[in-house]
Amino acid sequence: MKHIFLIGMMGSGKSSTAVALAQRLQMPCEDLDTSIEHIGEQTVKQIFEDKGELHFRQLEKLALREAVKKSSRVIATGGGIILDQSNINLMKSAGTIVFLRTSLQMLLSRLQNTADRPLLGSDHPQVALEKIWHERASLYETAADLIADTDGKTADEVAGDIEGLLT
Ligand code: S3P
C-alpha cells in the first residue's frame, strides 16, 4: 500500500484524523508540521516569524520529500501544501490524496484560538481565514483523489469514512 495524504484547511482535523486512520489501518502516522519543526529546529510559528513564509514553504517541500521516501504511512500535511504544484504531483505519484472538506462556518467555530496559526494573524483572523478558504477550496478539490466531509463528525468517524472510501 502507498502513502495516504490528508489535505485540507487548518482546523479541518487532519492531524487527529491521521492518528485515527493510521490506527485503523495499522500504518505509521506522520504529521508534516512536526517534521518541519524537527528540520527547522523551531516551531512553525517561530519559523514564520523569524524567517518568513517562503522559508517555511521550502522546509515544507523538503519535509514532504523526506516523508515519501519512508515506509507507507498516513501523512497529515499542512494546509498550504497544495500551493505548490510540485507537492501535489509528488503526492499523486506516491499515494492517495484525501481532502478533508470542512465548511467555512465550522472552521470559524473551531479556530477561535488562533495563537499558533501564523497565517491568521491576530487582527482579523476571521477575515483572513475566509480569504484563504475561498482561495484554496478549488485547489483542494482538484488535487484530491478522495473527499471526506468532516462537518459534525469526530476524527474517528472521518477516519472510518476514509477507510470505507479506500476499499
Ligand atoms: C498552514 C497551515 C498550518 C501550517 C502553517 C501554514 C497553511 O498547518 O502548516 O501554519 O498555509 O494553511 P495546519 O493546516 O495543520 O494548521
Image (tube, grey):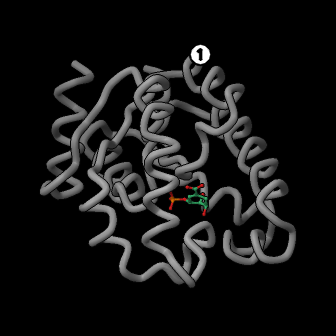
Please tell me in which quarter of the rendered image ligand 1 is found.
bottom right
Query: What residue is shown at x 49% (from left), y 25% (from top)?
Result: 143
- Residue 37 x/y as whole percent: 70, 65
- Residue 142 x/y as whole percent: 46, 23
Mark 1, Cα crowd under 10 Å, few <14 / some 14-19 / many 20+, is: few
Q: Which of the 4 image quadrants contains residue 15?
A: bottom left
Q: Is disc 1 placed on a helix, strand or loop?
A: helix
Relative height, residue 87 to residue 1 (above, below): below
Q: Which residue is mark 1?
A: 93
Q: Amino acid at mark 1?
A: Ser
Q: Which of the 4 image quadrants contains residue 111?
A: bottom left
Query: What residue is shown at x 51% (from left), y 30% (from top)?
Result: 72
- Residue 66 x/y as whole percent: 73, 39
Q: Is residue 83 left or right of residue 113?
A: right
Q: Is residue 166 left or right of residue 8?
A: left
Q: Is residue 144 left or right of residue 132?
A: left
